[in-house]
Image (cartoon, rainbow, N blue to C red):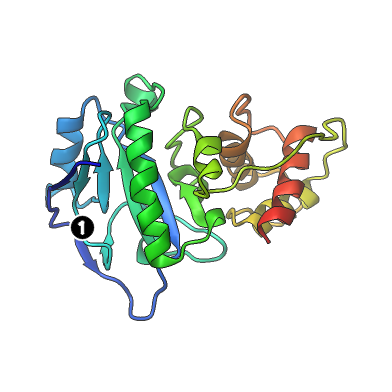
Amino acid sequence: MRLVDRPSPNFNERREGAPIDILLLHYTGMPDAAGALQRLCDPIAKVSAHYTIDEDGTVYRHVAEDKRAWHAGASAWAGARDVNDRSIGIELVNPGHEFGYRAFPAPQIAALIELARGIVKRHRIPPWRVLGHSDVAPRRKTDPGELFPWPRLAAEGLGVWPKHPRLDVSRSVRVPDLQRDLAAIGYDCPESGVLDEDTRAAITAFQRHFRPALVSGIPDGETAALAALLRREVR
């Protein structure tokens, strides 16, 4: 792994006593790496991450891990609403959905795995708290997106992937049950019993991560079965 220091001024102190217990993955969502790196280090932009990984596997270090980088924005997970305070953020160079979303190259993912292994070991981050930006900000974000290889990372202990040899995809879907399961996993999903916009956003984010073949926001039987299964696995 080639590591290059590219410091960003965009950080501040973490809240005293705040645990670092989330590893949050993003894509840059810009046309090229040069523009993304410039923005992450621009004091006017007021955004940053701890690291950026280019498509060739080069890792750029922007912010020290003990500092609070500005990458998550308005976000929530498992009841915590200042995700920046308790997370390490990694950006993956990829143009994203706006500029020609594409698969993540093997050298980039290999570098991510090597970097992430060290991060989760240093901070004792559990696998179920290795997340995507869309997981913690489902109404605003779609990254790292449905092409991100979550099963590959889970095989390395970096994230979870539901073990579902057989699923009852014909099961009836009860919105209150699905809301309960998504909230238990960590999604910011209201347990209102109503299929509202927040619930649809949480369903979409869950599908993007765990059922990327069909990201619809519709609470179908497979989504409900996966959510129930995953809730039991991560709790």
The picture places residue 98, in percent across and down from the top left corner, at: 35, 24
Q: Is residue 222 above or below residue 22?
A: above
Q: Residue at x 38, y 35 (%)?
A: 109
Which quadrant, please, contains the C terminus? bottom right
Determine the image quadrant of residue 92: top left
Horizontal side, residue 38 vs residue 20: left or right:
left
Horizontal side, residue 102 vs residue 4: left or right:
right
Count residues near mark 1 (Cα–Cα under 10 Å), then give few for <14, some for 14-19, many for 20+: many
Horizontal side, residue 85 vs residue 195: left or right:
left
Q: Is residue 145 visible?
A: yes
Q: Residue at x 34, y 52 (%)?
A: 89
Element under disc 1: loop
For mark 1, what is the residue?
63
The picture places residue 9, in percent across and down from the top left corner, at: 13, 57
Which quadrant, please, contains the N terminus? top left
Q: Is residue 73 visible?
A: no
State the residue in front, 14 or 232: 232
Q: Residue at x 45, y 36 (%)?
A: 142
The picture places residue 213, in percent across and down from the top left corner, at: 61, 24
Horizontal side, residue 206 vs residue 156: left or right:
right
Q: Residue at x 51, y 30 (%)?
A: 146
State the residue in front, 219 or 35: 35
The picture places residue 15, in percent across and down from the top left corner, at: 33, 76
Amino acid under disc 1:
Val
Determine the image quadrant of residue 50: bottom left
